[in-house]
Amino acid sequence: MSNQNNAESTNRDNRFAAIARAPMQVVGAPSHPLGGIWSSARDIWGQREMLDLLIRRDLKARYKDSALGFLWSLIKPLTQLVIYYVVMGKFLGAARGIPDFAVYIFTGLTVYSLFSEIISSTTGSIVGNSGLIKKIYLPREIFPLASVGSALFNYLIQFSILIAATLVLSTFTLSPNLLFILPSLFVVIVYGLALGLLLSAVNVYMRDIQYLVEVGLMVMLWASPIVYSWSMVRDQVGNSLILDIYTNNPVTLAVLGFQRALWSGGTDSANTPENLLLRLVIAAIAGVVLVLIFHRVFARLQGNFAQAL
Amino acid sequence: MIESAMDTSLTPEAADDRPDVIIIKDVSKRFVIRKDNSLKERMITFGRMGRRHREDFWALNDVSATIKAGTTIGLIGHNGSGKSTLLKVIGGIIDPTSGTVSRRGRVAALLELGAGFHPDLTGRENVFLNAAILGLSRKVTEERFDDIVAFSGIADFIDTQVKFYSSGMYVRLAFAVAVHTDPDILLVDEVLAVGDEAFQRKCLDKIRSFQEEGRTIILVTHSLGQVAELCDRAILLNRGNVVYEGPAHEAVARMRDILEERRVDELVEADPAVEIIVPRILDTTVHAIGKAVGDPVEHGDDLLVTTTFEYPELSPVWSGAVQIDNSSGQVVFGTSSRLLGRELAPFAGHYTLQFTLKNVWLGTGKYFVNISMQDKSGRHLADFPQAVSFDVIYYPLAVGTSYLEPELLEVGPPTPAP
């Protein structure tokens, strides 16, 4: 009994000593911009297990109790593929100028659906986790990040189907063009994250954002060369400023990048803009800057999340 | 009666070598109450018009306090006094409008049991998720998993989705996870009020062992008895201001004053046309017969409680009541003129009652006497909590609230059957 008491009191003294050594930290201090990013990055890194668990939770909970489970994340894009293939390709004749039309559409669709899923799920991520945010402190960036993570996981499934399809249709070629996947994927993720951070925070204060996002995503689908080809747009507007604006849309660039990598017609210079790689790199850099800026906005707005939710 | 916040760093304290864990400095929190919430309304009421649609509400006003390691501190105050807001500011869940909170050590916030439980996941999955939320690594959670399940007592259901849990099971599992994290600072908001009695006892026992281990606990609760029982110190908040900071029992007494004041205020607000008659309880004294006021009471003594009531006009038919609480706020005795079968006639001005409580057999400790004046149907007209107190002399032979004369006979080992 007395041994236990001694153990307890040393336990207690050790705890006090450890506390006395630890530096005082100001809770939720708004520090200067760069330091703020550094310290939130460190916070988030410290919570990476939590991030991992949240992603798993999202994925597990999504198709729990449904008989087909993860198959559902494939059924939707495959249905879209069939519709576009039949309606756009055959009925409206878009397939005539585009070889391997099915691969073409599926390439664009997977990129777009990754972007669309990132944006729509991050936008709702803070509001959807209000129960946690109101009760417990975690670096709030974790919630949009977890949404990005689960969107990426779904994308991986679709992507492997895409690769399998190109193999079956024997259009798959090992060439340096495959490397276009990397900057393209990076661009999608960076812009998805940047916009996701901004939209998730603003959505807390104005719930209109989630409806606005739905509309915006619909526009995005048709504003990128997914079911029609980039050359069709060029033929309509010519080599003008409008074409540049159209092309430099990050989603368009990413779609074009993926098509260059995986679609047999992508290497044909008639089908793609000049300097695609350079454009992708510039877009990626601009995207990183956007992430930093929107993260500051997020950090500014997050102080009032708990009471606005 | 409103006193400025005492600076604890100046208060002499027995164990002053303990390090500070939380320093709250001039913290204010403003809530903006908006009456427009959609983009459309916001656009219409933009600019100057917009200001009419918002209202400022200061939930905290220049709150300062220093909390030392290993203390258990209660935040008390009535609804809307800002205590939960203060707890959330300490936890980092809400940023203060001005001022700073600094702290050190690991914090676990128990603002709601099972916050972050996902209904579609199984108990097992939720344990890992919730443990991670409370800052435990996966490896440590795996090590403690068996303990957690054993503590919760729901091992049979651990692989069932939590949406099928009864509310009791849910709470048990959540609490089991929370107490197996290893926080230096534990923030607790009202969660001890849930669950059945056995479970509450389990919670309280765990809180006590946390105290032993030198963890700092900050407790928000409406149960004043719990504050008096568990806390070393308390901070009393009223309308966002610190009214009192100091020993828990003193804070509890002041809290009761505020509640009484509010009751009177509400009467005034309810019907401002009627002039409010405020009956009062004036002097109360207590002493053992044959001893002076303030002398310790011994068992077998007869207590004499004398109290004077004041009623500005002619009172209704009334009754006077006396109640004795121990130092942890538990009622140990109560009686009233009604229970004694007496109906007290109306009076105006002052009226004095004397209760004789014969044969006191109370355990060692301090006892508080509460007096109240009630009307015929038992509604309280006036209360005077902790009007006076008395001490019961130290008995080395026993502990507890009541005193029985103990004797021991050693019967010895069992005698073999003949």
Image (cartoon, helix red, strand yellow):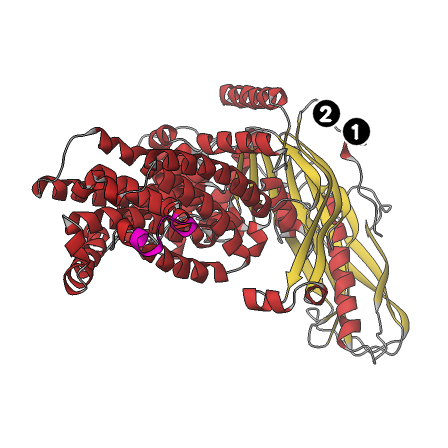
**Residue B351 spot, x, y in % from top left:** 88, 69
* B17 vs A73: above or below: above
Give the residue drawn at x 12%, y 40%: A171
Q: Is residue B403 visible?
A: no
In the figure, is residue A161 to the left or right of B79? left
Q: Is residue B4 visible?
A: yes
Q: Chain of mark 1?
A: B
Residue on which the image places disc 1:
B12
Q: Please, what is the dominant secondary structure of the magenta stretch?
A: helix
In the figure, is residue A6 to the left or right of A68? right
Magenta-drawn stretch contains A235: yes
**Is label 1 in a helix, a strand or a loop?**
loop
Residue B16's disc number: 2
What range of the chain is rendered magenta?
A: A233-243
Q: Amino acid at mark 2?
A: Asp
Q: Are marks 2 and 1 in contact (CB under 8 Å)?
A: yes
* B387 vs B11: above or below: below
